[in-house]
Amino acid sequence: MQPASSQRWRLAALSVTMLLPSLGTSIANVALPTLAETFAALFRDVQWIVIAYLIAVTALVVAAGRLGDVFGRRRLLLAGIAVFALASAAGTFAGNLWLLVAVRAVQGAGAAVMMALTVASVGDVVPKAAAGRAMGLLGTVSAVGTALGPSLGGALVAAFGWPSVFAVMAVAGTAAFAFGTRLFPADAAAAPRRFRLDPAGTLLLALSLGAYALATTLDAAPGVVAFLAAAAALGFAAFVAVELHVESPLIKLPLLRDRTLGTGLAALAIVSAIVMATLVVGPFYLADVLGLSAVDVGLVMSVGPGVSALTGVPAGRLVDRLGSYTVALAGLGGVVAGSLLMIALPGAIGVAGYIASLATITAGYALFQAAGNTAVMNGAAADRRGLVSALLALSRNLGLVTGASLMATLFALGSGGIALLGLVPGTASGLQLTFAVAAASAGAALAVAGWGLRGR
């Protein structure tokens, strides 16, 4: 293992690599109105700038992780950064909307590689005893990137126009590539082994995940959404059938039977969906019920990513000191408690109650993410870290896109009033129903993780 100073520099390089995909997720959103005006496009067309990136990341992250294990994490990670930087540079010169959408899809492909292999590379940089701190740091950086994106994007658009958003990502990607070339650990020399690609499994999984992401994010007619959902379900079934019979599967399905991995993925998806609920439901409640202005809504909403960023590194240190099991359960307990508080506190004491509830949820999420990721990655074989890291990224992403759809549906249902549950029509009832379901879901995740992580 490298000296401590070398470890710090290499972790810094990984942190920059982790920052860019999360920044890419949120930085372009604020430019959508400007882009709609520039290209004389409707919002349903402009939103593809966000959807294309999301679909590419979701569909390709597992394949990226598997390929990193086979061909070397360092070289594939550098390739992913290069693709991200070049696509960002191309975005600054996009002359029409659909070219920019295509650029965002390519950028998302690079981001998928970066998301899959950054976490996987932690085991090549630090010993297991310090893995918690490294995971906490990467979680903090990811949260900072997500939180920084809207404000940085807004400032760039206002000062220099929308191409500057892509120019900044291109410059940052170039810097990350330069740092990575010097600092990423060399790929271990592996004994020669026969490897066959699994094109059928890779294609089926990518198409199925893409259809699922579309079904949960696209603002389309119910028939179209139902068709996409059915296509995703059939695609997943076909993928499982293929993986059970090919010689070199993309995912060895027995791997998912591992107790720590399976329960960790399930719990991460659940808590990610709950965090997404705070982003989807929160603005409506803060504006409609508490009467906050758009500026004040933005300030309150920034509390969540801020708390997550501040909690990440201390959470990692707690994992190294107390173990993954204790910290994971404490984190999930915080998500349960925060969801229960969200049902009552905002109505009782207003904005302060909402902020307290939001801070409790996001702090719990940060604790669980650091602990769960550490437990899962420490249990992964060296030649499977890329795949396992990709599965973690996929689980989080699926939780976010599912949460955006499901939680919005619950919120709308509750806002319409449900006499059987004592909910009167109004936005406050929507918030209460959403977080009642969130609390029950977090409780289920707590039970599942308590069983799965025991002994880690």
Image (cartoon, helix red, strand yellow):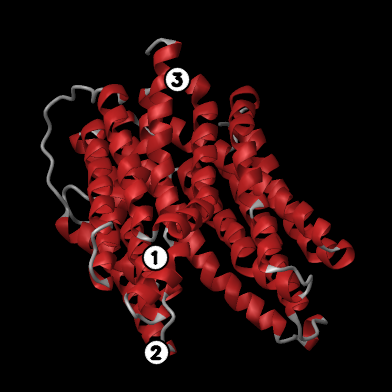
Q: Which residue does the image show at 27% across and 23% down from the upper left?
A: 182
Give the amino acid type for the residue marked by disc 1 in the picture: Val
Q: Secondary structure at mark 1?
A: helix
- The nearer-to-camera label among 2 and 3 is 3
Identity of the residue drawn at 66% across and 82% down: 413
Which quadrant: the C terminus?
top right
Identify the disc placed on residue 8: 3
Left or right of 33, for residue 74: left
**446 vs 100, nearest the viewer:** 100
Q: Are there few (<14), some (14-19), or many (20+) residues within 10 Å of tag 3? A: some
* Residue beneath the point at 43% across and 41% down: 19
Q: Is residue 188 above or below residue 435?
A: above
Give the distance between the C-alpha atoms of the residues marked 2 and 3, in whole angstroms. 52 Å
Above or below — where is 269 with respect to 322?
Answer: below
Residue 159: x and y in percent read 45, 55
Q: Quadrant of residue 279?
A: bottom right
Q: Is residue 376 left or right of residue 426?
A: left
Asked which secondary structure carries label 3, the reply is helix
Q: CA distance from mark 3 to mark 1?
A: 34 Å
Q: Is residue 143 visible?
A: yes
Q: Earlier in the sequence, mark 2 or mark 3?
A: 3
Which residue is denoted by mark 1 in the rendering?
50
Residue type marked 2: Gly
Residue beneath disc 2: 223
Q: In terms of image quadrants, where is residue 407?
A: bottom right
Q: Earlier in the sequence, mark 3 or mark 1?
A: 3
Mark-to-mark CA distance, 2 and 1: 22 Å
